[in-house]
């Protein structure tokens, strides 16, 4: 093929492809336009995960009929006067590529009315062809419908994921953006159903409550710092409160939502070792910068920015968060010092955590199998070798140190993790569990509802190593348990409560069954342990795949470094 | 005949004996695992339920028609019968059946459409009213009760409009069933209204009403009071007949005056689709647009509010403040709703307790709901909500009692056992211990038998159908000891029992039946103790319902962008960018908002002209709906709103021919108009969407103009009137009456498609004579030749008709704009 200039259609498609990667990109471009137009309400209607249609409607300024075709043309914008403006961009969009790109890859209908116009106007576009402007009824504002994304690019369409997954991206992006625009109402619908609707928030914190839940919003810490033309504000989670991934970290620069590895690092660094590996803080951090201090024209999707003074931005953000955390820690410390010492810190062994009703007869259904200790499994955990157990606190926590850091381990959570990994490993090998018959079968009675549920669960419990048979009306007979649980008192009643609850919630799975098994067969809070036992537990814990969390995702270990202790002591 | 009856078997004697006492009902009698009906009733239910009709030997070689439904499926069949407006009497077995002896049976419940109590038979979000109308001299009383909530209220009307008002009240209540204590010759209109609502007119002999108490009720005349007592007595007699009890089955009656609410006549309520949709989409109602209630109690209260908006400004503002507190504080609203979500229908729970028909699950639901009361109260601790929150009472003792006595998740039927905690009674604990002991001995027996027979695979198994048995595999079955009694043969083994095993089984089952008897007694005691709190529970339920509605209105306001309207004592309206709350939901962001301004004195009679499909009807309805929303205390869909309190809303909105009543469209139109002219006050809102269409043009125009002039010439003041018409001549009224202002919906011609109108859906000052009728006809698909012919005819007619007085569009517009400059809306 000889060299030739590409036809405009192809050029358009290629250029559009850089901006419109997937349905969420359409939503992003359109919603940013709405916000730039001063909208107070933005509504996003999605069909088929965005693969069908995306409609964004707003009550913004609207577009004059004669400007409608122009709005669809590439490099046409009302937001940028000339090249000089590029270095002081205050709007979210500026290149005039958004609508044009959408029109290039979607069948697009634009409907708009300016305040003061008697009637609105509509124009349709598909690829490079823009239809005639027609009069149409419309409220003040703009409404863009983008249908059949990538209809002319079947290959691109193939790269899209399921409608459910694409919709999830849309929902996640839009809800994150909403944090920076608390006074704007956002509504998202999918296939005619309202998925969520955020009323305008009277206060910025209310928007956080809408997204993170009222309880989490109450715990979050406000941050604020200013310096050298930069302002940082927002809300972040306290150290004890974290999530398993970064998806709830919202970072805004001049109210533009973006991903910046740099700034995310600043955020995480502020927490230092208050965070466990693999856990992340959440919240919203917003930077307001003089537009001349920042270059948003780095990436077609504007998902990253470049600061003129990168180090400064990084440092200010880190310090803003860190000082909020310090204030929080100081407040907590004050409370600790001021409140009388809790009883259990003096008398070990009085804290007993028991989910069950204390009025119930003591463990009449629970099975006390063999006594506590079994022969220790031969394990060599190098990682834990240097750890020294200092003491057992309140018969619940193990205090240990490696000479540098101070570690506090939740004995129950740690043991649960050890048990869970053993069960999971064996199950994944497909081994048949070794059963141990009970000397005396246990007969227990459950409620009607539980009996019905238990009947259905019997095959799964069977394959987990239990032999349970019906033995009378609402009565069952437990004949054997998995071998491992000889070593511990196994709380059958609590185990069943867990499993039946999960079944009712629909969260029941093989993993949750293992987790329940592990939990109910582990050392409990309030159980006294020998030093050797504790050392053995730590050795086994630190050879686990994920030693930092119990089977239910709660932390097992808290760690304070020497420097952190120093900070707490205000040295 | 007599001999035949004498030969009927005792069961049929019993059935027809009971039936004779309940002639109005279909009798279903429990026989074993079935509810059966015989004779005519069998034929009735076979037809109604589409179940098999068979026959049964009735003694003496005779056969009687029979049909029956299994006991566990009763609810489903009851629903069907009740929907068909039938009355069902349920006869239960009153003692445990003994072979060869006739079991005692009698009616324990008469189910009628208006006396439903069972959650399964009732929609959760709507009231189910039983009403009674009593006429005494000049007075008419209307009483209504919801048997499922215990609510009871009564009002009376006297004077010239008594009948009209009572009929309107009856229609507003939309009862499921009505008792009419009215002389036969005056019953017809009442029976008609009841039947139009799809409800049943209950048959109750007037003689059944006793009239002892005659003390006057506060705020009502002697005669009114007497009528009200009669209406109440009729209700009590009716509920007593349903076996629910009389006065004790309901709360103390509340009296009210219909004038304390905005009156919305039945036609308006229907046409405005307040709680019921006319079209196929059941969600297209005002209720659905604002109902975000988390409980059935809340939804029911909200529906009631919408049908009876307030007319006192202070009360409206009080409700607004409660809603506002939750609009402004999202976290509070979210937390409140989260807790409400976990509340069961406390109102109906308490009522089932009051009439002693609460099942174990009802008590468990009560227990869980009580746990929510404290957190709900805590969330409502702001001044605007505190008054409501204070009405939620504390039930510490009751909670403790329930927690100690009732199992957390009891079975639905008391007879299943396991309802009462064994710890609640020593005797009960003993029964449980006996059973456990016997089961352990069975397990030990297994060990022993294994040793004795040497069969390792010997096992004691339990099945629901056969109880306990010793199971031996086929290979060893032959070696079973001599004292083993064969019970069942399986494909791969055999099951046996032994005298000892049998004995243990008997021990278990006798302990079980003793436990059941004990539980029954303990449960009855518990229900009595809980029922003693019924009235307090209901008061708390009411408070919960209020909080639920406030939160619901707050949520709708937030989600849909409503504003808090300023409520005015003056008769005026100023709405900026108002939207139709229902249509905007269906259209999404495409809905075109419009302004509306009504002043006191001038500019309060709007004549709206313009083409069909232009949005006139939506605009008219919108004004009525916004007024209703504002007066229940809700926010309204607009950018700014100021609304003067309205005492009545009248609508004359084109409805289809009422073929059933045999009245023509035109007649109905005129009847509605007559009603409006007779009843409207200067504080009313009158919405007229076309009038005089069903007759000749001259007549129609003449009538329309006369109606307008009547309203304009009213002695005191003109009500607010929104008048949409195709009679362009009416715009001339603006020249004579400063109260009249012309508005029009706009359309422009499509620049590309010749003549086709494009509607802007905007309502603007001025008038238009462009109806685009022929263009709309063309768009609707009328053949081109017809359209062409219509066009030329129209041109001809315009040239010579004597009615043609229309001013050309442009000229007219200009004049209107000069006359009524669009004043700046001065709102806040």
Image (spheres, coloured by chain):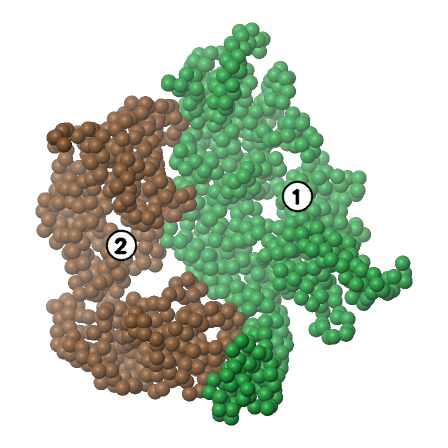
Chain colours: A brown, B green
* Cα distance between the residues tagged 2 and 1: 54 Å
Looking at the figure, which quarter contains the C terminus of chain A?
bottom left
Q: Tell which of A264 and B403 is nearer to you.
A: A264
Q: Tell which of B654 and B532 is nearer to you.
A: B654
Judged from the image, the secondary structure of the residue bearing numbered disc 1 is: loop
Instruction: Judge from the rendering whether residue B36 lies leftward or rightward of residue A35; answer left or right.
Output: right
Looking at the figure, which quarter contains the N terminus of chain A?
top left
Q: In the rendered image, which residue does mark 2 sit on?
A: A248
In the rendered image of this protein, does residue B499 appear above or below residue B343?
below
Q: Which chain carries label 1?
A: B
Residue A260 locus on image (x, y percent): 17, 50
State the residue lying farthest toward the bottom: B452
Kindly indicate the quadrant of the structure image that contains residue B504: bottom right
Residue B654 locus on image (x, y percent): 58, 29
Q: In the rendered image, which residue does mark 1 sit on?
A: B198
State the residue lying farthest toward the top: B800
Disc 1 crowd rating (10 Å Cα; few below 14, some 14-19, many 20+) is some
Residue at (46% x, 29% y) in the render: B596
Kindly indicate the quadrant of the structure image that contains residue B40: bottom right
């Amino acid at each position: 093929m000889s060299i030739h200039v590409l036809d405009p259609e192809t050029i358009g498609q290629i250029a559009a492809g850089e901006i419109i990667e997937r349905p969420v990109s359409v939503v992003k471009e359109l919603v940013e336009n709405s916000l730039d137009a001063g909208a107070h309400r933005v509504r996003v209607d999605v069909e088929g995960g965005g693969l069908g249609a995306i409609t964004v409607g707003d009550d913004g300024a609207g577009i004059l009929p004669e400007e409608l075709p122009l709005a669809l043309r590439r490099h046409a914008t009302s937001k940028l006067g000339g090249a000089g403006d590029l270095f002081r961009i205050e709007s979210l969009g500026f290149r005039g590529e958004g609508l044009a790109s959408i029109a290039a890859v979607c069948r697009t209908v634009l409907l708009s009315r300016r305040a003061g116009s008697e009637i609105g106007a509509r124009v349709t576009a598909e690829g490079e062809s823009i239809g005639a402007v027609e009069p149409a009824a419309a409220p003040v504002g703009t409404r863009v419908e983008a249908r059949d994304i990538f209809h002319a690019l079947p290959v691109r369409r193939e790269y899209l994921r399921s409608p459910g997954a694409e919709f999830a991206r849309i929902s996640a992006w839009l809800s994150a953006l909403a944090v920076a625009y608390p006074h704007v109402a956002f509504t998202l619908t999918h296939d005619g159903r309202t998925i969520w609707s955020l009323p305008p928030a009277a206060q910025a914190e209310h928007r956080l409550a809408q997204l993170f839940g009222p309880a989490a919003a109450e715990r979050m810490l406000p941050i604020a710092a200013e310096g050298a033309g930069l302002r940082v504000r927002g809300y972040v989670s306290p150290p004890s409160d974290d999530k398993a991934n970064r998806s709830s970290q919202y970072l805004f620069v001049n109210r533009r939502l973006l991903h910046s590895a740099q700034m995310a690092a600043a955020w995480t660094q502020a927490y230092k070792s208050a965070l466990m590996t693999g856990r992340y803080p959440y919240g919203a951090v917003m930077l307001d910068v003089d537009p001349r201090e920042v270059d948003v024209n780095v990436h077609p999707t504007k998902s990253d920015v470049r600061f003129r003074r990168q180090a400064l931005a990084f440092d200010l953000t880190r310090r803003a968060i860190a000082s909020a955390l310090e204030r929080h820690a100081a407040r907590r410390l004050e409370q600790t010092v001021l409140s009388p010492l809790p009883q259990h810190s003096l008398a070990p062994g009085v804290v007993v955590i028991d989910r069950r009703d204390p009025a119930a007869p003591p463990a009449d259904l629970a099975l006390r199998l063999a006594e506590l200790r079994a022969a220790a499994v031969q394990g060599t955990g190098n990682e834990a070798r240097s750890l020294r157990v200092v003491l057992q606190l309140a018969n619940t926590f193990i205090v240990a140190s490696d000479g540098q850091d101070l570690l506090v381990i939740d004995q129950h959570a740690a043991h649960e993790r050890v048990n869970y990994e053993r069960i999971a490993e064996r199950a994944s090998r497909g081994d048949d569990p070794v059963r141990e018959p009970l000397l005396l079968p246990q007969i227990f009675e459950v409620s009607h509802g539980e009996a019905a549920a238990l009947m259905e669960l019997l095959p799964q419990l069977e394959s987990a190593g239990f032999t349970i048979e019906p033995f009378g009306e609402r009565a069952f007979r437990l004949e054997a348990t998995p071998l491992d649980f000889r070593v511990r008192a196994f709380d059958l009643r609590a185990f069943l409560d867990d499993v039946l609850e999960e079944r009712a919630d629909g969260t029941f799975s093989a993993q949750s069954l293992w987790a329940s098994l592990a939990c109910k067969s582990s050392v409990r809070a309030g159980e006294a342990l020998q030093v050797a036992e504790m050392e053995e537990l730590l050795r086994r814990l630190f050879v686990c795949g994920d030693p930092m969390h119990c089977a239910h995702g709660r932390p097992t270990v808290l760690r304070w470094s020497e420097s952190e202790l120093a900070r707490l002591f205000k040295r | 005949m007599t001999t035949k009856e004498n030969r009927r078997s005792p069961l049929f004697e019993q059935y027809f004996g009971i039936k004779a006492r309940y002639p109005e009902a279909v009798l279903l009698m429990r026989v074993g695992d079935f509810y059966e009906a015989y004779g005519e009733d069998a034929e009735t239910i076979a037809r109604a339920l589409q179940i098999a009709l068979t026959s049964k030997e009735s003694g003496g070689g005779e056969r009687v028609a029979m049909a029956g439904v299994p006991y566990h499926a009763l609810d489903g069949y009851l629903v069907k019968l009740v929907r068909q407006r039938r009355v069902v009497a349920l006869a239960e077995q009153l003692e445990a059946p003994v072979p060869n002896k006739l079991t005692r049976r009698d009616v324990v419940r008469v189910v009628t459409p208006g006396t439903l109590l069972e959650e399964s038979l009732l929609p959760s979000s709507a009231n189910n009213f039983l009403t009674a109308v009593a006429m005494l001299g000049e007075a008419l009383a209307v009483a209504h009760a919801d048997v499922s909530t215990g609510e009871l209220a009564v009002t009376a009307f006297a004077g010239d409009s008594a009948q009209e008002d009572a009929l309107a009240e009856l229609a507003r209540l939309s009862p499921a069933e009505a008792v009419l204590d009215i002389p036969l010759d005056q019953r017809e209109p009442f029976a008609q209204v009841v039947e139009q609502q799809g409800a049943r007119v209950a048959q109750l002999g007037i003689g059944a009403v006793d009239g002892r108490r005659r003390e006057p009720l506060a705020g009502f005349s002697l005669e009114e009071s007497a009528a009200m007592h009669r209406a109440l007595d009729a209700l009590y007699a009716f509920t007593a007949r349903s076996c629910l009890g009389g006065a004790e089955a309901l709360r103390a009656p509340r009296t009210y005056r219909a004038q304390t609410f905005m009156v919305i006549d039945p036609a308006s309520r229907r046409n405005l689709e307040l709680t019921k949709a006319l079209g196929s989409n059941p969600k297209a109602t005002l209720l659905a647009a604002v109902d975000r209630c988390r409980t059935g109690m809340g939804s029911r209260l909200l529906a009631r509010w919408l049908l009876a908006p307030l007319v006192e400004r202070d009360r409206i503002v009080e409700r607004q403040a409660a809603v506002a507190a939750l609009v402004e504080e999202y976290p509070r609203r979210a937390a409140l709703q989260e807790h409400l979500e976990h509340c069961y229908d406390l109102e109906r729970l308490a009522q089932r307790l009051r009439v002693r028909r609460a099942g174990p699950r009802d008590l468990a639901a009560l227990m869980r709901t009580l746990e929510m009361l404290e957190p709900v109260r805590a969330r409502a601790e702001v001044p605007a909500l505190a008054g409501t929150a204070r009405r939620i009472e504390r039930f510490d003792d009751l909670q403790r009692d329930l927690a100690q006595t009732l199992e957390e998740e009891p079975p639905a039927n008391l007879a299943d056992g396991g309802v009462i905690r064994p710890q609640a009674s020593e005797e009960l604990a003993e029964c449980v211990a006996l059973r456990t002991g016997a089961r352990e001995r069975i397990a030990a027996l297994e060990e022993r038998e294994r040793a004795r027979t040497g069969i390792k695979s010997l096992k004691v198994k339990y099945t629901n159908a056969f109880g306990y048995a010793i199971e031996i595999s086929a290979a060893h079955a032959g070696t079973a000891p001599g004292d083993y009694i064969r019970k069942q043969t399986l494909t791969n083994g055999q099951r046996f029992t032994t005298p000892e095993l049998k004995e243990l089984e008997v021990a278990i089952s006798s302990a079980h039946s003793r436990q059941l008897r004990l539980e029954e007694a303990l449960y009855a005691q518990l229900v009595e103790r809980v029922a003693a709190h019924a009235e307090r529970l209901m008061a708390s339920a009411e408070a919960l319902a209020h909080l639920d509605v406030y939160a619901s209105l707050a949520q709708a306001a937030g989600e849909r962008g409503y504003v808090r309207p300023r409520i005015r004592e003056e008769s005026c309206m100023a709405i900026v960018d108002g939207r139709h709350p229902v249509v905007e939901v269906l259209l999404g962001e495409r809905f075109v908002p419009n302004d509306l301004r009504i002043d006191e004195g001038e500019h309060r009679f709007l004549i709206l002209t313009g083409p069909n499909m232009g949005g006139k009807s939506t605009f008219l309805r919108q004004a009525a709906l916004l007024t209703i929303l504002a007066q229940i205390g809700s926010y309204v869909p607009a950018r700014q709103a100021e609304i003067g309190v309205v005492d009545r809303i009248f609508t004359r909105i084109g409805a289809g021919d009422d073929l059933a009543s045999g009245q023509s469209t035109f007649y109905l139109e005129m009847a509605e108009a007559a009603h409006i002219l007779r009843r409207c006050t200067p504080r009313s809102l009158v919405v007229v969407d076309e009038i005089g269409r069903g007759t000749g043009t001259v007549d129609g125009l003449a009538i329309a103009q006369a109606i307008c002039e009547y309203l304009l010439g009213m002695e005191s003041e003109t009500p607010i009137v929104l008048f949409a018409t195709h009679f362009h001549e009416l715009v001339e009224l603006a020249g004579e009456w400063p109260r009249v202002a012309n508005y029009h919906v706009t359309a422009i011609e499509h620049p590309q498609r010749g003549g086709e109108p494009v509607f802007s859906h905007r309502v603007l000052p001025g008038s238009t004579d462009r109806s685009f009728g022929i263009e709309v006809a063309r768009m609707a698909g009328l053949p081109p030749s017809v359209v062409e012919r219509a066009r030329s005819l129209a041109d001809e007619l315009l040239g010579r008709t004597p009615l043609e007085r229309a001013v050309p569009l442009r000229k007219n517009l200009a004049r209107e704009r000069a006359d009524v400059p669009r004043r700046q809306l001065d709102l806040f």
